[in-house]
Image (spheres, rainbow, N blue to C red):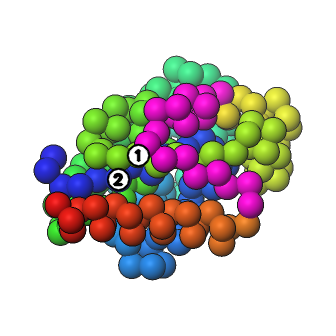
Amino acid sequence: MSKYVIGLTGGIACGKSNLSKALKANGVPVIDADEISRALTAKGGAALPAIRERFGDRVFDGDELNRRALSDIVFSDPKERDALNGILHPMVLDEIHRQMDAIDGPVVMDVPLLYEVGMDAWCQEIWCAYVPQKEQVRRVRKRGAITYKEALRRIHSQMPVMEKRRRADHVIRTEGSKEESAAIALGLWRNAVEKLERG
């Protein structure tokens, strides 16, 4: 892939979505894997028949996916999580390729499981959103009204954020305000564009 691709990743509840949103709001082309996944699993989404076939009616409310019920299953059993990923990842990858082909110039690829699925190999540089685990737990619990143990289980379902941080080219700490974190990401984007323009 000859296009200049910047990978944006991070652990769950590390503030990556805020960075992605700020980049988009400032005209940066962003391909958002979570957004693609949500579209695939929304009412009428292309992934729903395969999900119903694998997990049954227990994860549906009528025609709509019950995301909480599915989350409870996949975050408590790695085999179930692998089964869901086996359905979603090929579809997400196809759509990422489609969007990538439509963009001329540098692009940010926002992928939570960037390292886990080997997509870091697509990237010329990687940014990692980061907060310490204590703050991660607090945010996950606040977001989903879940127990401390459940929050840890979700965090540990991904590669440790310290490992993602170690492997990234740039680390964006997001303990401060959303505006401060966004300014760092936009600064990194400007630096990348200037570097490309200089050749």
Q: Position of residue 68 (x, y in %)?
A: 68, 47
Of the residues under marks 2 and 1, which one precedes in the sequence? 2
**Residue at the image position 48 percent from the left and 67 percent from the top:** 187
Question: Residue at coordinates 48% horizontally, 47% vertically from top-left?
Answer: 170
| Residue 40 is at least partly visible in this image | no
Quadrant of residue 77 in the image? top right
- Regarding mark 1 in the picture, which secondary structure is present there? strand
Q: Is residue 177 left or right of residue 159?
A: right
Is residue 36 positioned above or below 112 on the image? Answer: below
Q: Position of residue 54 (x, y in %)?
A: 45, 32
Q: Position of residue 100 (x, y in %)?
A: 23, 59
In this rendered view, identify the residue nearer to me: 73 or 31: 31
User: Which range of residues does the magenta coloring cover?
Assistant: 156-176
Residue type at mark 2? Ile
- Residue under label 2, please give it: 6
Pointer 1 residue: 126
